[in-house]
Amino acid sequence: MRNFAGIDDKYCSLEGAMTLLQSIPYDGTSTWGKGANYAFPAFLEALENMELYDIETDSEVYKTGIHILPDITESSSPEAMVDAVYASAKKIILSEKFPTFFGGEHSVSIGVIRAFAEKYNKLTVLQLDAHADLRAKYNGTPFNHACALHEASKTTNLIQVGIRSMDSCEIPFLNREKCFFAQDIHDKTNWIDQSIKLMTDDVYITIDLDVFDPSIMPSTGTPEPGGLNWYTVITYLRKVFHTKNVVGFDIVELAPQKGQKASDFLTAKLFYKLLSYKFENHEK
């Protein structure tokens, strides 16, 4: 396994790293654009071509240490994949390091969130996404990418941001007071504090990259028009990190396209930004 962003070995050891990165290259239930199972190598390549000094936070967060764990390769069935991810996430949480996960399609988040919901009694799940993902079952399984947040809607305090596509069958599972539709928050900022006030102390963040507008993030399975821009997302997430205890996060649904590196780079930059926010006040 290559080092995160090509950094020195001394920042990548399991013992010394403060962050763990788990790749789950599963793309078994996606129904349109395929390729999320190829996302991690593209992400790592983009990281290696990115400056590691973050201007916004005046930091070099890689020095806190980032260790890449072996991929979870279970793909015999959606249920088996979720079980494998759940078992791995439970162990990672016990490490007392900062857990991060990288998809793969959004169904990989089901097992991760299940493990965090068991660890934290009053867990908030913050979902940034174009799609509600609240179906109880799709194409014969509750472990489809279209069902990624159904279980979380029952077991956690689910806050949804950027939603702009859903099916009528999802309406019974939607809490409108905790869903900030993209069209309602466009060119506004009051929703930021409103959504944060609805969160509990411990927050897990799941980011489907199609939350971004396809003009800046075309490499996803289902790009939806009317998405969020870069500065809206990072301004919001920095405030979440500053005001809440973010216990982990995942980024999913990058489907790399040949000759289109911008989406890969945005994904790498986003991941690094989130770590910079998490450890912004860490004394080195």
Image: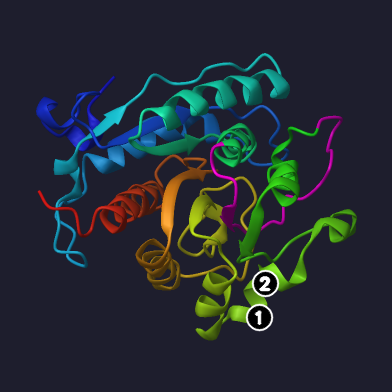
Q: Are marks 1 and 2 in contact (CB under 8 Å)?
A: yes
Q: What's the mark number on residue 163?
A: none
Taking the magenta stretch, the answer to whether it contains residue 124 is yes
Residue 283 visible to the viewer: yes
> Is 77 positioned to the left or the right of 52 in the image?
right
68 lies left or right of 55? right
Residue 148 horizontal/vertical position (percent): 69, 42
Mark 2 Cα shell of 10 Å, populated few (<14), some (14-19), many (≥20): many
Q: Nearer the viewer, residue 29 or 276?
A: 276
Q: What residue type is labelled 2?
A: Phe
Q: Which amino acid does label 1 sit on?
A: Asp
Q: How far apart are marks 1 and 2 (CA)?
A: 5 Å
What residue do we see at 33% from left, 35% from top? Answer: 97
Q: Residue furthest front?
A: 121
Please name the predominant secondary structure of the magenta segment in the image: loop
Residue shown at the point (52%, 69%) measured from the top left: 228
Q: Is residue 59 above or below residue 219?
A: below
Q: Quadrant of the N terminus?
A: top left
Residue interval drawn in magenta = 119-141
**Label 1, on which residue?**
184
Does dot 2 land on a helix, a strand or a loop?
A: loop
41 or 200, which is in the foreground?
200
Question: Which residue occupies the foreground of this view, 281 or 251?
Answer: 281
Where residue 164 appears, as percent x and y from the top left, is 69, 66
Identity of the residue drawn at 58% across and 26% down: 86
Quarter of the image where one finds residue 237: bottom left
The location of residue 195, given as percent across then percent down, is: 57, 72
| Residue at mark 2 | 181
Q: Quadrant of residue 194?
A: bottom right
In the image, residue 36 sits, relative to residue 238, either above or below, namely: above
Total numbered badges shown on the rendered structure: 2
